Amino acid sequence: MQTWLFFLLPIAALSGWLMARKHYKNKYQPQDNKLSPEYFSGLNYLLNEQPDKAIDVFIHLLEVNSETVETHLALANLFRRRGETDRAIRIHQNLIARPTLNSQQRSQALLELGLDYMKAGVLDRAEQLFLDLLQQASPPEQAIKKLLRIYQQEKHWEKAIDMAKRLQPEQRKDIGILIAQFYCELAQQQITSSASSIRGYLKQAQHYDHNCVRASLLEANMQITAGKYGKALKTLQRIERQNHRYLPEALPKLLNCYQKMGNIDGFNSWLQQLVERHPHMTSARLMLTQVIQQQQGSQAAQEFLYQQLHTYPSIEGLHELLLLGQGSNQSLIPLITNITNSLIDKGDRYSCQNCGFAGKAMHWHCPSCANWGSIHPTEIHLSALEKLLEPSS
Ligand SMILES: [Zn+2]
């Protein structure tokens, strides 16, 4: 069996070579013959950095030979990438004016022209071109995506929602999160108008993203304004299930609700359970300290926080503790040393000036944004604090 194969190999190779030769002859030889001297003079202008002369030559060529559409598209894209949008626009407009283009080429050229206008910042023209493309039987997905981007830029949320819903299912990964944000934007725009329309938007937001924390916060705001503190409380506590990292945004509102309802004890026990469920949530621990201070006075609050900070050190906690004891207590010194030690251990010594990446080791090539030489040592060895300590201008 294997010897057979061995003898077949040279025959296969020969027939492959013959096929390829025939293919290349058919495909490239006739076209090579068609390339006129003008083509090369255009190329020459281009290489000699005389783009406008090159464009003149290529546009004239297009009139003679419409088979060079791909070349024109490539050339115009090159200009757009270099930021020379007026040249890209000129080529694309000229392409579109050709009656010989087939429908696919025309729609491609229209799309490209729209991208030129977008890059040039002429958004209304870009929008119109993309909208025209949407009238086609099978509109290009790119047009929908670009319109989605334009409407976000112009804060036309209804239109943005419409575009997001038109995306093909395979393009719609996480689109629900986006649509929910757009509905929240609408709700915020309407903040002075009727409550029912805002509620409608927030309902839509929750429909598209069950975990939309922003919608919950906005809904709670409305309930607080209407004096419905019990309802607001439930809405805000829902955030723990949605994404507990956002709970710090809800805590001051929760305090307000519990206070209005005269149930600060209820808040205390809810916070105790919350801290058990999320031991590293500093904001919850600080809120609990505040509640203890209200209920039992400063001494009790200090003792609670002092104990907590040994296990879960934090700068904010230390700051709060110093405020509670007016910074005079000598017994705080070991705790302070403990906290500064742990911050220096955990803190990032290096940070990227380009993207904000922070790490403990020196990299000359940023692992996050791939910039060279943008990572600097942070002088105080705590990149997070560096920003806070910068003199304000
Ligand atoms: Zn970086």
Image (spheres, grey):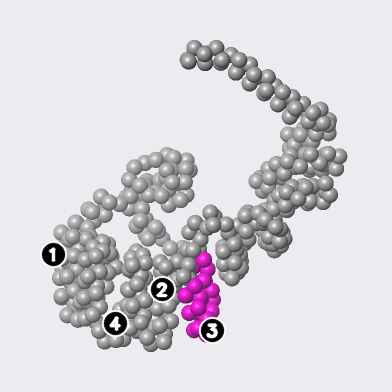
**What is the C-alpha distance between the residues marked 4 and 1?**
34 Å
In this rendering, would 266 be left or right of 378? Answer: left
Q: Which residue is mark 1?
A: 331
Three-letter residue code for mark 2: Ser
Q: Looking at the picture, how far across and down is residue 31, in whole percent?
A: 78, 30
Q: Which residue is mark 4?
A: 258
In this rendering, would 73 be left or right of 181? Answer: right
The residue range painted magenta reads 179-204
Q: Which mark is residue 193?
A: 3
Judged from the image, the secondary structure of the residue bearing numbered disc 4 is helix
Three-letter residue code for mark 3: Ser
Task: Please tell me which residue lies in front, 327 or 320.
Answer: 320
Tell me, yes or no, whether the two marked residues, 4 and 1, touch with CB atoms within 8 Å: no
Q: Which residue is mark 2?
A: 216
Tell me, yes or no, whether the two marked residues, 4 and 3, touch with CB atoms within 8 Å: no
> Residue at horizontal 59%, vertical 70%?
158
Judged from the image, the secondary structure of the residue bearing numbered disc 2 is helix
Q: Is residue 286 magenta?
A: no
Three-letter residue code for mark 1: Ser
Residue sitting at the far front = 1
In this rendering, the answer to whether 297 lies above or below 108 is below
Q: Earlier in the sequence, mark 1 or mark 3?
A: 3
Judged from the image, the secondary structure of the residue bearing numbered disc 3 is loop
